[in-house]
Amino acid sequence: SSPDSDGMTPELEKAGLLNKTKIAEGGRKLRKNWNPSWVVLVGNSLMFFKDPKTQNSDSWKPGNSCPESSVDLRGAQLQWANELSSKKNVFKLRTITGNEFLLQSDADTVIIEWYSTIQKVISRLDKE
Ligand code: I3P
């Protein structure tokens, strides 16, 4: 049988390395601090892990450790936000609780795929 024969394990949608900064917490503006982050989209959650390159061992792998932070995509909003940074290929993710993140990649195809995959999950949750 498949590893998820009970249907209870949420599906891994996407994982990869992006540059990340949190710019607001509960609607309150924060100072930018860009860092590479291992981003994992599973089910309705976007999880941020430490950049594997800055760690030895496999402790960053999902399931092997807690994410540094995790975002519930239900009710979240996504928009391109190149005006919010000097970097290219930036989008903003705003959670229902007023936390705001910028995510960025120098690679056009990488950031476009992340944008559309996250947007697909948000749209699916909006319809539920
Ligand atoms: C910030 C840092 C960020 C930059 C931000 C600066 O300075 O250089 O990388 O954001 O620009 O304020 P500091 O390290 O002194 O906090 P971008 O790379 O996204 O442009 P901003 O203030 O215009 O957002």
Image: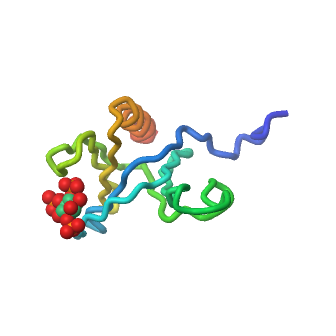
The residue sitting at the left extreme is 83
Q: Nearer the viewer, residue 53 or 77?
A: 53
Describe residue 62's horizontal placement relative to residue 84 as left or right. Answer: right
Quarter of the displayed picture in which ligand 1 can be seen: bottom left
Describe residue 13's horizontal placement relative to residue 128 as left or right. Answer: right
* Res. 63 image quadrant: bottom right
Q: Quadrant of the N terminus?
A: top right
Q: Name the spot of residue 98 as percent of width and height, x first.
A: 29, 62
As drawn, 127 above or below 22: above
> What residue is shown at x 63% (from left), y 54% (from top)?
61
Q: Is residue 2 visible?
A: yes
Q: Nearer the viewer, residue 15 or 46?
A: 15
Q: Is residue 29 visible?
A: no
Describe residue 24's horizontal placement relative to residue 19 as left or right. Answer: left
The number of numbered discs placed on residues in the rendered structure image is 0
> What residue is shown at x 30% (from left), y 65% (from top)?
33
Q: Name the spot of residue 50 as percent of width and height, x first.
A: 51, 60
* Res. 80 image quadrant: top left
As drawn, 99 above or below 11: below
> What residue is shown at x 36% (from left), y 49% (from top)?
75
Q: Name the spot of residue 12 as percent of width and height, x first.
A: 60, 41
